[in-house]
Image: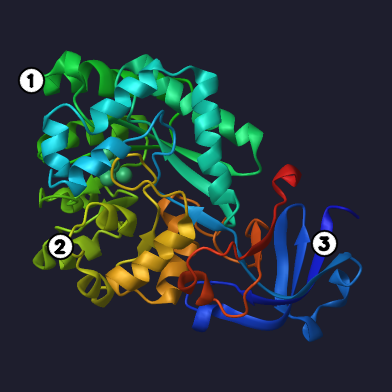
Amino acid sequence: MENRRLYVQCRAATMQSGAKAYGLIEDCAIAVSEGRVVWTGAQESLPAEYAQFTQEDLGGRLVTPALIDCHTHLIFSGNRAREFEMRLGGASYEEIARAGGGIISTVKATRGASFDDLVTQSLRRLDALIGEGVAVVEIKSGYGLTIEDEMRMLRVARHLETLRPVKIVTTWLAAHAVPPEYKGRADAYLDEVVIAGLKQAHGEGLVDAVDGFCEQIGFSAAQIERVFIAARDLGLPVKLHAEQLSDQKGAILTGKYQGLSADHLEYLAPEDVPAFATSGVVAVLLPGAYYTLNETQLPPVDALRQHGVVMAIATDCNPGTSPISSILTAMNMACTQFAMTPEEALAGTTRNAAKVLGLLGEYGVIAPGARAELAVWNVDYPAELSYWMGGAPLHHRITHKAAL
Ligand code: DI6
Ligand code: FE
């Protein structure tokens, strides 16, 4: 039967919870039925009932769960290469933002682009991720900043899912910046656009989670809390850009609302880590932004690790601070810059990234019950995924999305 497959002749990094050494299974077989893994283990112990499934030989290759990019802003128009030049000339990200550049310059370009144009530009970035084994991508709004333009971004996001075999998870990030027409009236912007628009977008089924930019050049913790309350009233989970450029206590606030994740965290105070750890919020680390901004303040990775905080890694793909459409590059940077282990980096783009998106057990592991979304690699050892830069190591992706 076509919807029953048995993948054989592979080494699988199953990334199962609690497993050591990538949960590696040598001479592995993976049985799939109706788009889900039903059995995995050493091929020699395959139960007879799966031996009849249509076999596919993976040639001894390494297999991992398909990768997950749990934090992107990949829908936007244009680019900010000019600002890149300005920063190299000595201007800071905040100075450029205050002078009307930064996020607002991408807002202008994105408002001015047609729906089809946004699809075309974003699809290139999505295809780059897919070409590195990614099967699930979170995409935020945040470059529209009117109700209609924010909703349009999320409609583009939903549309992308119909064009490629990927799962797209959407996030309402209208609280990304105050647009020029609301200058000096941030609270009115929150009421009239961020919160009013959230209700509307949620009513149209466009929103899976709610995010904000808690920063001196974004919104205060008190303002973000208003957005979180609106999300809670609608039954939507929250997450936050927290402590990227300064310590606003955003990570702790996210814990108070049982958020999915607090993202960036360079300026998270080590003394706040124990309280943050008890909240169960995942730390999403974004080394691409750290790298692009030439940041020197490292996130407190050691303390996060010691307190058992679950850590994920993502590209933060955006035109300002992380012009990176490569999840493997983000993994490499997590190791070289944040001293994470290659196993933490892979967990950060599989099992732990699934947790950030509320998809724990569904994606990001090779285990019975999980969706059979897999990546087959031209490498032997899982650490190679974080080690090589470039070189297109993906052999192919296995997707059963159509079966679901
Ligand atoms: N933090 C970031 O790194 C991006 N957004 C945010 O809140 C930057 C977005 C941009 O500069 O366009
Ligand atoms: Fe971001």
Ligand 1 lies in quarter: top left
Reading the image, the residue beneath label 2 is: 297
Assess whether mark 2 and mark 3 are in contact (beta carbons under 8 angstroms): no
Residue beneath the point at 15% across and 36% down? 96
Residue beneath the point at 42% across and 65% down? 331
Q: CA distance from mark 2 to mark 1?
A: 30 Å
Reading the image, the residue beneath label 3 is: 5
Question: Is ligand 2 closer than 8 angstroms to the Cβ of mark 3?
Answer: no
Q: Is residue 308 visible?
A: no
Quarter of the image with the C terminus is: top right
User: Foreground residue, 275 or 140?
Assistant: 140
Q: Which mark is residue 184?
A: 1
* SS for callout 2: loop
Residue 59 image point, x, y percent: 78, 74
Q: Quadrant of residue 210?
A: top left
Q: What type is the residue that disc 2 sits on? A: Gln
Q: Quadrant of residue 365?
A: bottom right
Residue 289 image point, x, y percent: 29, 52
In front: mark 2 or mark 1?
2
Assess whether mark 1 and mark 2 are in contact (beta carbons under 8 angstroms): no
Residue beneath the point at 38% across and 60% down? 313
Q: What type is the residue that disc 3 sits on? A: Arg
